[in-house]
Image (tube, helix red, strand yellow):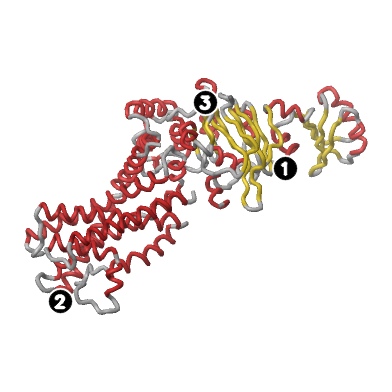
Amino acid sequence: MNDVHGVFAIWYREYKVFLREKSRIVASIVTPVLWLFIFGGGLGSSVSIPGTNYQAFIFPGILAQSVLFSSIFFGVYIVWDRKVDFLKEVLVAPVSRTAIFVGKVVGGATDSLIQAAILLVLGVVLSAAGTIRDLHVGAAALLAALVILALTTVAFVSVGLIIGSVMESPEGFQLVSSFVVFPLFFLSGALFPIGKLPLWLAPFTFLDPLTYAVDALRGVLLGASHFHVAFDVGVMAAFTLLVIAVGTRAFERMKV
Amino acid sequence: MSIIETQQLTKRFDALTAVDALSLRVEEGEIFGLLGPNGAGKTTTLMMLTTLLRPTGGSATINGFDIVREPGRVRQSIGIVFQDPSSDDILTGYENLKVHGMLYHMPPARREARIAEVLELVELTGRKDDLVKRYSGGMRRRLELARGLMHDPKVLFLDEPTLGLDPQSRERLWQYIDDLARTKRITVIITTHYMEEVDRLCDRMAIMDEGRIRALDTPAALKRVIGGDIVKLRVRAPDVEALRRLPFVQAVEPADGALTLTVTNASEHLPELLRAAGAVDAVEVRSPTLDDVFLHFTGREIREGSAEGGWAERMMHHR
């Protein structure tokens, strides 16, 4: 079976659905903006990070957060597909399960990247207006950020789809994914520097793949990262390959 | 070679044998009906034939391809209209068909031509750019029929195709299906609870029960198996024994205050029958229907329009 057409067909469907659900796009932009202004502005008024201001410091973290949330929650659509029977139509088509998985990943990643791109543009605007200082908004920095975000979203859409492939109900999915999403977010250093963590916390933070995404984004957008950006990207790439492998397996076994 | 051939096809779920050594052949261009009460195994049979479920024994080919060894080729050869809606309601009718064409790897030019053709066939051309959620139940079913046909399958599977449709929509759908088989030589496999549907459409039918085929023939031949006409009598003091002694009476079944008799050549023997029955309040004579056939082979009435979910749904519970 030649499967590229299958991947493309699934992607096309996901993309069309995404464009129809405008409220999803709006909601996915509003939440990070609230974090940036209310949390960043509020806490930033009394907390300072050496070398930059707090709002600029958490901007890469908020980008990563928005991609993390939208990517993992994308997994709920596979649960809906099963409930609403669209999946049957796909499963009896001459397309492999792997192609279906990859198509879904690319579809979900497209959604998240469009949202991330809107947030990046917002960052550029806020920099120009002087609201957020110290952000690198040159073409090279933005492009590098998008590449890191692409890797991040592919990884976490896969995670979401793995969860979705075993859940029977959307409610169950919400519950389980919350247990995954919040620790990933809070441990990642999206909201704090990871250089001087207490000994009990550091191992958890360094086990969290999102830590490396946030660190890499800080590297390219603020010029300051804990690890070398290449190392961060390497860790993310390895994690991405792992979850794609697991996800492909999960789709092979998925019950209709 | 027959378009569909199964040999000792079997599916066991732990202790339950859902399909028990099923062997049948369906010829090209036939409309073949699969009837049975819920749990008879027709669902599981369909799932195996459409490659969604692996058999535990036996084998089957569709269009010459083995359902286990060549699932990709089997899938390319078949189209399916599921019992439950399986179109995307947030996409337009056209977009649903386009996604289908892409999944089946149709070249764009042929895909667009086929979309126009099948939309015309099911009379949805004017509504193709409306979201499917604005469609009525009948329109949606027609769209799914169009979709199942788009890639020119050799075999079309229809699972309870008219369940929940109003009489006009049902009649329209029957017309399309009939035309397809007659003019395009597409083989159609229908599972249904509606005897009327089988009578109207099917060249041959199989009655399944407990994983086995109880009867397989043309609807007319199966009705002849009953071997007579059905006479219903409402009698005040029924003398069942006297009626049974009449040479032309084959069977007498008392049922809620009336007697149901199977009678050879009822129009000729009716006067004699009535004399033997004594005081009769009401009498009804009719030819046997498929309901009688079903009752004869399974000992059960078929329940029309069962609310049970589609077969792929039930597969989820099987596993």
Rendered residue at 61%/34% (across/down) = B6
Residue B14 visible, this angle? yes
Q: Tell me where residue B15 appears, x and y as whole percent.
A: 66, 53
What's the amino acid at mark 1?
Arg
Point out the frontmost of discs 1 and 2.
2
Classify 10 Å Cα crowding around label 3: few (below 14), some (14-19), many (20 and above): many
Q: CA distance from mark 1 to mark 2?
A: 78 Å
Quarter of the N terminus of chain A within the rendering: top left
Quadrant of residue B132 within the rendered picture: top left
Residue pointed to by mark 2? A47
Q: Tell me where residue B20 appears, x and y as whole percent.
A: 67, 42
Query: Which element carries disc 3, helix, strand or loop?
Result: loop
Asked if the residues shown at circle 1 and circle 2 are in contact, with their CB atoms under 8 angstroms apart, the answer is no
Q: Tell me where residue B117 appears, x and y as whole percent.
A: 40, 25
Q: Is residue B199 above or below residue A48?
A: above
Quadrant of residue B25 within the rendered picture: top right
Q: Is residue A179 left or right of residue A53?
A: right
Question: Do dots 1 and 2 share one subunit?
Answer: no
Rendered residue at 27%/56% (across/down) = A237
Residue pointed to by mark 3? B186
Q: Chain of mark 1?
A: B
Q: Is residue A57 above or below residue A197?
A: above
Residue pointed to by mark 1? B300
Q: CA distance from mark 1 to mark 3?
A: 32 Å
Q: Is residue B226 above or below residue B132?
A: above
Q: Is residue B247 left or right of residue B157?
A: right
Q: Between disc 1 and disc 3, whose residue precedes?
A: 3
Q: Is residue A25 above or below residue B261?
A: below
Residue B302 visible, this angle? no
